[in-house]
Image (spheres, rainbow, N blue to C red):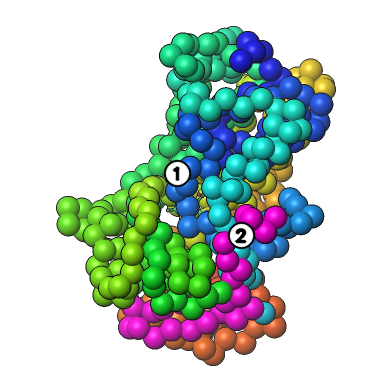
């Protein structure tokens, strides 16, 4: 490990990988520090991503990244009624269920092939802050501590992000906006291949949902997220999941369990500081409705490195100069969607099961010429003017 790079990236997830790759492709030196012993494992994710979103980064999607192609989404209301969002309407729900063990590893591989360095089982345990600037990180690696300096540090250390906190940024997620999740990888289950399934309702998943994301003909990620404030003894995410699995997949075999958290809060108030850019889950950029954040991490990681390269070329990586990153993502399609989806989420978590039933059952009467979350919500508002009145003015 060298003692100095242009860009030091904390975390080897999709955000960190895209940041490092973009940095070296822009002519900078870059190093990824990853605390886990292997990139991509254990993976804490249901692995769903929209086809249009992943295509933004790759001319071709490598078949080994894909566990299943998704054609439709099915939503199941609290009263058991269900409806499909078909391919023409399903927008982001049409896409892939990835195999992130391969996907995440290949992203870092591409960064390393392009010239980045990467150290696994290397943990950032503190920030180097001097003269009001983040100037690097203290890294624990192979039983030793190293000071690694950089012009710009990119914090891509995921939902549990500590690095920004070491730098003095408040990253607290209110408990009610932290979804606690449990997920089984299951085999030997009857599923509809090519269909992602979502169950909503207070009894099934309070302030969250259960998902089934196919991984093959008879296997799937079967998981749940519930609000942190709803998680209590005997009513943890895993308790709800076990109940669901026992009732619906009694013959199923569990071959993996993951427990994790997803933030459904607003993004950090500011995602840069002198010498620091925060990306992906660390910046709280996961979607407040779905919890999805793979694309968001890749987009922000890439953008962070582009802005870092420009600032380094101009010999100015102050907060003011790096603000271009913060302003760009907020103005982007992603930033606008995060803002809108936060408003929608805040309304939906307050609905009781009867209101949810009414809204979801009205979906069968939708009249949409084009699909987007905004047109879907506007249609639902037209059909449920009283329940969704607080969403008036949604942009
Ligand atoms: P991460 O992928 O979390 O990567 C951060 C990395 O930083 C980790 O490898 C971590 O080990 C490392 N790290 C942390 N601290 C340090 C440190 N101090 N030093 C060194 N390394 C460190 N998103 C979707 O788009 N689709 C889904 O279907 C989906 N399902 C999900 C299901 C569950 C149960 C959960 C928990 C999340 C899900 N997500 C999903 C969210 C998605 O996993 C994240 O948004 C995405 O991985 C964020 O990427 P990232 O690069 O920001 O962070």
Rendered view: 172 above or below 254: above
Q: Give the residue at mark 1.
A: 42
Residue at 26% in and 63% down: 242
Rendered view: 358 above or below 347: below
- Tell me if residue 315 can be seen: yes
Q: Position of residue 152 (x, y in %)?
A: 66, 22
Which residues lie in the magenta part? 62-87
Residue at 54% in and 17% down: 137
Badge 2 crowding class, 10 Å Cα cut-off, few under 14, some 14 to 19, many 20 or more, is some
Quadrant in which residue 339 is drawn: bottom right
Badge 1 crowding class, 10 Å Cα cut-off, few under 14, some 14 to 19, many 20 or more, is some
The dot on residue 66 is 2
Labels 1 and 2 touching (C-beta < 8 A): no
Q: Position of residue 119 (x, y in %)?
A: 57, 25
The dot on residue 9 is none
- Tell me if residue 271 can be seen: no
Residue 66 inside the magenta-drawn segment: yes
Secondary structure at numbered mark 2: strand
Rendered view: 272 above or below 245: above
How far apart marks 1 and 2 lie (CA) works out to 17 Å
Rendered view: 200 above or below 25: below
- In the image, 38 versus 93, the foreground residue is 38
Q: Position of residue 342 (x, y in %)?
A: 50, 57
Residue at 57% in and 86% down: 366
Q: Position of residue 389 (x, y in %)?
A: 47, 73
Secondary structure at numbered mark 1: loop
49 relative to 331 in the view: left or right: left
Quadrant in which residue 224 is drawn: bottom left
**Quadrant into which the N terminus falls:** top right
- In the image, 239 versus 191, the foreground residue is 191
């Amino acid at each position: 490990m060298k003692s100095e790079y242009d860009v030091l990236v904390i975390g080897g997830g999709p955000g960190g990988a895209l940041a490092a790759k973009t940095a070296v492709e822009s002519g900078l030196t870059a190093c990824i520090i990853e605390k886990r012993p292997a990139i991509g494992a254990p993976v804490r994710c249901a692995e769903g991503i929209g086809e249009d979103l992943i295509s933004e980064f790759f001319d071709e999607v490598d078949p080994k990244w894909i566990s299943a192609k998704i054609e439709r989404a099915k939503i199941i209301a609290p009263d058991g009624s269900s409806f499909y969002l078909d391919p023409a309407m399903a927008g982001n729900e049409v896409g892939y269920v990835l195999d992130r063990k391969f996907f995440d590893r290949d992203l870092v591989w591409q960064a390393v092939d392009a010239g980045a360095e990467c150290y696994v089982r290397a943990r950032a345990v503190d920030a180097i802050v001097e003269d009001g600037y983040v100037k690097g990180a203290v890294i624990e690696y192979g039983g030793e501590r190293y000071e690694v300096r950089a012009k710009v540090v990119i914090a891509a250390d995921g939902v549990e992000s500590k690095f920004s906190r070491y730098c003095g940024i408040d990253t607290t997620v209110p408990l009610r906006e932290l979804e606690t999740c449990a997920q089984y990888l299951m085999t030997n289950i009857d599923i509809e291949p090519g269909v992602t399934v979502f169950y909503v309702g207070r009894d099934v998943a309070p302030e969250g949902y259960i998902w089934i994301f196919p991984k093959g003909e008879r296997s799937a990620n079967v998981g749940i997220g519930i609000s942190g404030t709803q998680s209590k003894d005997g009513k943890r995410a895993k308790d709800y999941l076990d109940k669901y699995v026992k009732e619906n997949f009694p013959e199923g075999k569990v071959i993996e369990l993951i427990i994790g958290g997803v933030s459904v809060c607003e993004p950090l108030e500011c995602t840069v500081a002198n010498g620091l850019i925060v990306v992906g889950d660390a910046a709280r950029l996961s979607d407040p409705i779905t919890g999805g954040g793979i694309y968001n991490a890749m987009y922000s990681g890439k953008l962070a490195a582009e802005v870092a390269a420009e600032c380094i070329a101009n010999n100015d990586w102050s907060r003011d100069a790096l603000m271009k990153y913060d302003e760009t993502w907020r103005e982007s399609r992603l930033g606008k969607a995060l803002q809108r989806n936060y408003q929608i989420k805040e309304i939906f978590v307050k609905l009781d099961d009867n209101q949810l039933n009414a809204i979801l059952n009205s979906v069968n009467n939708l009249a949409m010429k084009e699909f987007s979350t905004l047109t879907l919500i506007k249609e639902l508002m037209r059909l449920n003017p009283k329940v969704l009145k607080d969403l008036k003015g949604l942009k």
